[in-house]
Image (cartoon, rainbow, N blue to C red):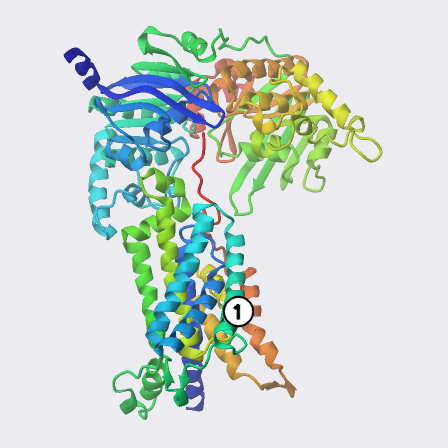
C-alpha cells in the first residue's frame, strides 16, 4: 500500500510537471511541421508567464491573466513569423533573439512595475483581497471516493484535483492529432514543412500557412506559460521557464513530430522530474546523493537520449529553410 | 473582326507581348505565342533561353512586367497559381512538386480539398483517379508514400494532379529528363490520348528528337526571344538546332575508330553500401583501356554517382579492388582525391555547382581547385596571385571560355562556360585516365559540340576515358563500349556499334534483350 501510494504521488506529480511540456511540445509541433524551427518556445513561455501573472494580479482574475498571457505569446510568435517568414531570417537567430528579449524584458518590466526584484506579487494574498490563481478542480464524487482503497487513490488523488489547464493539455493531444491528420488545414500544414514549393504551386499561400500555424503555436505556448505562473507558482519569478521550452523541443523530436510521441516523451520527462523531486535526500550505500545530481538527471537523460537512443527521427524536410521562389 | 475573334477562340493560350526582367537580366523579350486548342505544342530553346520563365508566368509563379495572356480568347490576369489552376492550366514541373512522404492520394487532394475534413475529399479523389487512370493509362498506386515510387510513376501523379484539378491546358517542363526511353514513349502515348480528348499540351524541352516525335507545332526561343513558330512536320532537327543556337550546329560527333591499348582502369567486385544500408554499388566489374571511351548509361540514381565518387577517391573502397593507372586501391590501401590526382587521374564531377566549382570564387581561384598545392602557384608563404591569374587567362583563351576574364565570379559564367572551365582545369593536367560525369548537363548546344570534341581528342591521344551520362544520345555518340547500370549493378555491355535506344532503354530497366545476351556469350566464348 505504501508503494502504491508513492506511485500514485509520483504519477500525480508527473502530470503536473508534464503539463507545460505538453503544451509547449504541441506548440512546437505546429511550428516545426510547417518548417519553422522554434527554439523561441522558451521565450514565449517566459513572456506569457509574466504577462499572465501581471495581468492576473492587476485585474484580480486568473482568466484575464490567461487571456493576457496567450496574447503576449501570440505577439511573440508573430515577431518570429515576421522575422523568419516575411523577411526570410534565420530561424535560430530569431528564436535566440526572442528568448533573450523575453528574459530581459520580463525581469525589467517586472522590477519597474512591481518593485520586487523582477517577481510579480503573489497571486494569493488574503490581506489585500487578492485571489487571482487558478484553483485545482475537484471532479464529481472525488471526495466521497477518497477513502475507497485503490479507486480512491487512482481517482481522487491521481485523476481529480488538478488545475483546469492540466485537463486541457491532455485533451489537446488528441485534438491536435485530429487537426493534423484529419483536416484540410493539417494536410496543408504537413505539406508546407515538407515541400513549400509544392504547396505554392497548388495555389496555397506558404506564408499564410506559416503565420496561421505560428499563431496556434503562440496560443499553446501561452497556455504553458500561464500554467506555470498563474496556476502552479501563483507568482512570476524571473527565468521561471527554466529550459522547459528546450525540453519540449527535445520531447517533440523524441516524439518524431507526432502528438502521441511528443505526449509520451513529455510524460517521460515528467516522471523523471517527479522521481528526482521525491528522491532528494536519498542515500545510496551510505553515500548521500547530492540534490543537484538528481535534479540534473532529466537534463542529462535528454542529452543522452537525443544523442542516439531514439532511432532515426526524420524532421520535416524543409525545416529551417526560408521559402523563396526560385528563379530558373 | 469576326474572323479575328474566330482565330482567337481557336487558341487555348495566346501571349501578346510578354516581357519580364529580373534586375539586369531580360528573361523574356516581348514574347508572342499562339497555342491552338487540342494540339501538342513544343517550346524549344537552350538552357537560359527563357522557356521556364515564360511557363512560370503562364502558371502565375511570376507576373509579367508587360503583355497580356489570353485563355480561350479572353484576357486573363494570372497573378498567382490559384488563378492559373482556376483558368484550367495545369503544370508538371521539372522538379516534381510532390510531398515525398505523403501518398499519391494525399498529393492529389492537397490544395483541391472539398471541405474542412479530408476524408470526403479522399474518397472523391480516389474514385476520380481510378476513372482517369483507366481513361488515359495513368495507373499509380494510390496509398504508398510517393518517395517509394519510381520517377516515372511520380510524374504520372503530377499529371493526375493537374487533370484532377480540371486542367484543359497541360504544361510539361522538361518531362523526359529522368525517364527511360520506354517511359518516355508511354508518356507520349498519354499525351496523345489527352490530345484526343481535347486537352491542349505544351511540351517544354531541349531534346529535339522528342519535339519531332511528339508535337504538332514548335516555337523556338533564343536568349529571351521567340525566334520562330513552325509546324513540326515542316521542319527538321537540324533546322531547329540552328534556330536555337543562331548558327549551324553539327549534331553528329565526328570520330574515328578507337585504338584500345593496355587497361588503365580495372574494377573488380566493387561493392559500396551507403550509411542507411542501401547497396549503391553491387559487385561492379569493368575496365577501361587507353585510347577508348567507355560509357555508363542508366537512369540517374542507379549507382553511377557512387561509382565516380569511389573511383575518384571521394568515397572509400569498402570491398573489391580498383587498379588505377598501375596503382592498386582496396580496403587496406585507400587513396584520397588528391592522391588520385597525383597518379594522373582527372575527374570532371557530375555536378559542377556542388563539386566542380565554388560559385562565389573568381574564375582563377576556381581554376586551381584541387591543384592549389602545385609549386607554380605557390611562393614560400603566399600564393602567387599573378601567376594563377595569368595561367587562368591563358587557359581560358585556349579553351574558349567566355567572357575571358579570370577575375569574374564563377557564378556569372553561363553553364557551358563554367563546364568548360572545369574541363580545361582537369584536361590541362594531361591525365592518363579521365573520369567524366554528365559533361554537358545544363550546357547549351554550341558548347556541347566543343566539349564532345575535346573528349574525343583525349581518347585519340591515348587516354582512358570513363564517361557517365544520363543522356543516351551523348553516350551513343561518344562511347566505344557502353555499360548499363541498374540498381548498383552493371546490367550488361554493348559495343557502341550495336547499341540503339531500344536496347539501352530495356537494359536501363534491368531487362537484357536476347541480342545483347548473344553478344555477351560470343565475347566470353
Write the residue at 29% across / 41% down: B108
Horizontal arrangement in the rendering, residue B181 relative to residue B443 (left or right): left
Query: Is residue A233 shown to the viewer in this render?
Result: yes
Q: Chain of mark 1?
A: A
Corner quadrant of residue B306: top right
Residue A216 lies, with reference to residue B225, above or below; the image says below
Viewer-side residue, B496 vs A129: A129
Number of on-image labels:
1
Element type where label 1 sits in the image: helix
Corner quadrant of residue B429: top right
Viewer-side residue, B48 vs B333: B48
Residue B438 lies, with reference to residue A118, above or below; the image says above
Residue B311 image offset from top left, x and y in percent? 63, 32
- Which residue is tagged 1? A108
Residue B125 image offset from top left, x and y in percent? 23, 42
Q: Residue furthest left?
A: B2
Viewer-side residue, A27 vs B428: A27
Write the residue at 49% across / 55% down: A312
Write the residue at 31% across / 55% down: A181
Residue A178 image offset from top left, x and y in percent? 29, 59
Q: Residue furthest right?
A: B380
Q: Quadrant of the N terminus of chain B?
A: top left
Residue A246 lies, with reference to residue B224, above or below; the image says below
Q: Residue furthest bottom?
A: A147
Query: Is residue B189 shown to the viewer in this render?
Result: no
Write the residue at 47% across / 68% down: A46
Horizontal arrangement in the rendering, residue B342 relative to residue B110 (left or right): right
Q: Quadrant of the C terminus of chain B?
A: top right
Is the residue marked by circle 1 packed among few (<14), some (14-19), or many (20+) residues within 10 Å? Answer: some
Viewer-side residue, B137 vs A112: A112
Residue B388 image offset from top left, x and y in percent? 74, 25
Amino acid at each position: 500500500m505504501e508503494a502504491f501510494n508513492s506511485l500514485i504521488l509520483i504519477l500525480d506529480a508527473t502530470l503536473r510537471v508534464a503539463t507545460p511540456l505538453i503544451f509547449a511540445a504541441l506548440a512546437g509541433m505546429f511550428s516545426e511541421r510547417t518548417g519553422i524551427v522554434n527554439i523561441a518556445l522558451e521565450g514565449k513561455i517566459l513572456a506569457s508567464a509574466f504577462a499572465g501573472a501581471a495581468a492576473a494580479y492587476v485585474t484580480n482574475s486568473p482568466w484575464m491573466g490567461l487571456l493576457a498571457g496567450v496574447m503576449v505569446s501570440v505577439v511573440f510568435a508573430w515577431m518570429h513569423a515576421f522575422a523568419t517568414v516575411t523577411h526570410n531570417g534565420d530561424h535560430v537567430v530569431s528564436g535566440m533573439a526572442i528568448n533573450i528579449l523575453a528574459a530581459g524584458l520580463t525581469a525589467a518590466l517586472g522590477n519597474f512595475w512591481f518593485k520586487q526584484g523582477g517577481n510579480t506579487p503573489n497571486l494569493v494574498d488574503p490581506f489585500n483581497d487578492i485571489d487571482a490563481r487558478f484553483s485545482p478542480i475537484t471532479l464529481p464524487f472525488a471526495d466521497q471516493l477518497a477513502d475507497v482503497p485503490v479507486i480512491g487513490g487512482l481517482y481522487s488523488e491521481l485523476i481529480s484535483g488538478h488545475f483546469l489547464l492540466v485537463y486541457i493539455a491532455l485533451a489537446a493531444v488528441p485534438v491536435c492529432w485530429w487537426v493534423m491528420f484529419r483536416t484540410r488545414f493539417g494536410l496543408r500544414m504537413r505539406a508546407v514543412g515538407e515541400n513549400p514549393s509544392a504547396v505554392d504551386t497548388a495555389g496555397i499561400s506558404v506564408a499564410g500557412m506559416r503565420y496561421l500555424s505560428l499563431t496556434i503555436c503562440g496560443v499553446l505556448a501561452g497556455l504553458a506559460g500561464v500554467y506555470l505562473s498563474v496556476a502552479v507558482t501563483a507568482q512570476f519569478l524571473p527565468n521561471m521557464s527554466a529550459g522547459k521550452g528546450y525540453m519540449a523541443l527535445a520531447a517533440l523530436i523524441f516524439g518524431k513530430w507526432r502528438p502521441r510521441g511528443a505526449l509520451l516523451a513529455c510524460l517521460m520527462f515528467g516522471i523523471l522530474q517527479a522521481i528526482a523531486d521525491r528522491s532528494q535526500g536519498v542515500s545510496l550505500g551510505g553515500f548521500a546523493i547530492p540534490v543537484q545530481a538528481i535534479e540534473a538527471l532529466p537534463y542529462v537523460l535528454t542529452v543522452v537520449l537525443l544523442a542516439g537512443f531514439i532511432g532515426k527521427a526524420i524532421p520535416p524536410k524543409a525545416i529551417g529553410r526560408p521559402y523563396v521562389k526560385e528563379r530558373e | 473582326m469576326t474572323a479575328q475573334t474566330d482565330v482567337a477562340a481557336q487558341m487555348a493560350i495566346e501571349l501578346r507581348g510578354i516581357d519580364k526582367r529580373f534586375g539586369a537580366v531580360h528573361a523574356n523579350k516581348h514574347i508572342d505565342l499562339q497555342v491552338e486548342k487540342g494540339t501538342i505544342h513544343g517550346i524549344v530553346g537552350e538552357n537560359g533561353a527563357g522557356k521556364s520563365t515564360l511557363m512560370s508566368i503562364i502558371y502565375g509563379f511570376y507576373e509579367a512586367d508587360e503583355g497580356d495572356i489570353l485563355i480561350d480568347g479572353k484576357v486573363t490576369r494570372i497573378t498567382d497559381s490559384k488563378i492559373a489552376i482556376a483558368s484550367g492550366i495545369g503544370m508538371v514541373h521539372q522538379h516534381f512538386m510532390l510531398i515525398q512522404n505523403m501518398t499519391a492520394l494525399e498529393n492529389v487532394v492537397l490544395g483541391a480539398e472539398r471541405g474542412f475534413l479530408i476524408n470526403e475529399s479522399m474518397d472523391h479523389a480516389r474514385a476520380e483517379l481510378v476513372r482517369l487512370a483507366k481513361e488515359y493509362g495513368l495507373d499509380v498506386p494510390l496509398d504508398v508514400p510517393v518517395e517509394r515510387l519510381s520517377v516515372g510513376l511520380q510524374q504520372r501523379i503530377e499529371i493526375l494532379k493537374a487533370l484532377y484539378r480540371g486542367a484543359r491546358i497541360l504544361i510539361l517542363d522538361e518531362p523526359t529528363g529522368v525517364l527511360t526511353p520506354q517511359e518516355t514513349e508511354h508518356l507520349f502515348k498519354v499525351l496523345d490520348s489527352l490530345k484526343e480528348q481535347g486537352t491542349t499540351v505544351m511540351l517544354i524541352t531541349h531534346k529535339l528528337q522528342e519535339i519531332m516525335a511528339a508535337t504538332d507545332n514548335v516555337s523556338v526561343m533564343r536568349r529571351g526571344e521567340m525566334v520562330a513558330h513552325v509546324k513540326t512536320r515542316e521542319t527538321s532537327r537540324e533546322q531547329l538546332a540552328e534556330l536555337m543556337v543562331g548558327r549551324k550546329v553539327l549534331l553528329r560527333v565526328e570520330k574515328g575508330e578507337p585504338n584500345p591499348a593496355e587497361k588503365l582502369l580495372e574494377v573488380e567486385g566493387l561493392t559500396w553500401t551507403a550509411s542507411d544500408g542501401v547497396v549503391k554499388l553491387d559487385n561492379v566489374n569493368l575496365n577501361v583501356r587507353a585510347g577508348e571511351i567507355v560509357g555508363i548509361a542508366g537512369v540517374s540514381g542507379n549507382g553511377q554517382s557512387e561509382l565516380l565518387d569511389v573511383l575518384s577517391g571521394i568515397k572509400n573502397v569498402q570491398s573489391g579492388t580498383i587498379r588505377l593507372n598501375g596503382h592498386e586501391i582496396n580496403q587496406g590501401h585507400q587513396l584520397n582525391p588528391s592522391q588520385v590526382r597525383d597518379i594522373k587521374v582527372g575527374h570532371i564531377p557530375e555536378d559542377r555547382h556542388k563539386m566542380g566549382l565554388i560559385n562565389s570564387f573568381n574564375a582563377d581561384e576556381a581554376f586551381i581547385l584541387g591543384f592549389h598545392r602545385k609549386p607554380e602557384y605557390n611562393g614560400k608563404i603566399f600564393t602567387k596571385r599573378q601567376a594563377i591569374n595569368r595561367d587562368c587567362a591563358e587557359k581560358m583563351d585556349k579553351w574558349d571560355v567566355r567572357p575571358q576574364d579570370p577575375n569574374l565570379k564563377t557564378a556569372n559564367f553561363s553553364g557551358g562556360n563554367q563546364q568548360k572551365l572545369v574541363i580545361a582545369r582537369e584536361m590541362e593536367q594531361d591525365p592518363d585516365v579521365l573520369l567524366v560525369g554528365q559533361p554537358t548537363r545544363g550546357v547549351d548546344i554550341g558548347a556541347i559540340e566543343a566539349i564532345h570534341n575535346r573528349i574525343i581528342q583525349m581518347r585519340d591521344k591515348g587516354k582512358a576515358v570513363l564517361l557517365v551520362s544520363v543522356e543516351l544520345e551523348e553516350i551513343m555518340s561518344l562511347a566505344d563500349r557502353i555499360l548499363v547500370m541498374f540498381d548498383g549493378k552493371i546490367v550488361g555491355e554493348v559495343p557502341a556499334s550495336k547499341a540503339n535506344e531500344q536496347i539501352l532503354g530495356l537494359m536501363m530497366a534491368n531487362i537484357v534483350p536476347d541480342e545483347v545476351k548473344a553478344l555477351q556469350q560470343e565475347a566470353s566464348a
